[in-house]
Image: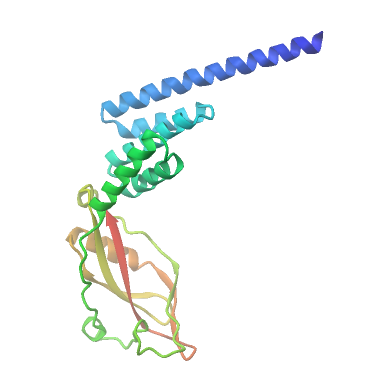
Amino acid sequence: MRWALQLGCLILAGALLGGCGTFMQGGAMNLAYAYMNKGQFDRALGELTAAERYAPPDYALNAEIAFLRAQCLDRLGRWGEALGAYSYAAEKYPDTTQGRQAATRLAQLKESLTPPVQTPPPINARDLYPEIQHVQLNNPSAPRDAVQPQVVHTVAPEYPAAALGTRSMVEVVVAFIVLSDGSVYQPRVVSCPDARLAEPSIRALRQWKFMPGRVNGRPVNTLCVQRFNVYR
């Protein structure tokens, strides 16, 4: 008799907890929509995370949460994260309305963020760095045993907020020399559509570290080029 009562109590407790979780999840979803309507997308993201935590396994609800999260990131101008979130929703829930909407918006966002096709400017080593002896290993005339420099430490550029938020993607091209000790010599901008993006790119590259390029087993100064794709 006692075990039956205990079992009944456990079942009742589980039902109560499930009902509580559903209630809290519903409240979080309502708040998420309310914040989105007010344009407070960062706060909406927090409520969506809470709703996901409280929600029972529910395919339709999870599809809704995934799509709303992508929309919030989109509205906040966090394009890289938005692309990933839309892609996740489209691939995870392809047979739902939200999944199809995510796929449509993903294609639109990719198109809007893709820069026009341009021929990159030719990089002439002699013009860029006449003051230092170096080699260029990424061309057909490089020795067969040449080894390109290998990056071992990177620092991401920190671009000013004023240069971001334009719903576009641009490319910043920077040339530099990897010295024989693996350090970076004098990064120089080759192409940059917005002058505000130049200095942060240079400042970041100065802090990169490499395994130096090698020719005949010996480290050499090597001309390199880095392209930064900037979502803004």
User: Is residue 202 rendered to the left or right of residue 90?
Assistant: left
User: Is residue 202 rendered to the left or right of residue 222?
Assistant: left
Quadrant location of the N terminus in the rendered image = top right
User: Is residue 87 rendered to the left or right of residue 24?
Assistant: left
Q: Would you place residue 227 above or below residue 111 in this image?
A: below
Count of labels in the image: 0
Nearer to us in this view, 199 or 28: 28
Give the image location of residue 106, x and y in percent: 32, 46
Q: Would you place residue 154 above or below residue 83 in this image?
A: below
Report whether residue 48 is seen: yes
Residue at (29, 86) in percent of width and height:
132
Residue at (39, 38) in percent of width and height:
99
Nearer to us in this view, 158 or 120: 120
Q: Which residue lies furthest to the right in this view?
A: 1
Give the image location of residue 115, x and y in percent: 22, 59
Give the image location of residue 199, x and y in percent: 24, 63
Report whether residue 232 is seen: no
Give the image location of residue 46, x and y in percent: 40, 32
User: Is residue 119 rendered to the left or right of residue 134?
Assistant: left
Q: Hey, which quadrant is residue 15 in on the image?
A: top right
Q: Residue furthest front?
A: 95
Q: Hey, which quadrant is residue 187 in on the image?
A: bottom left
Coloring scheme used: rainbow
Q: Would you place residue 229 above or below residue 102 in this image?
A: below
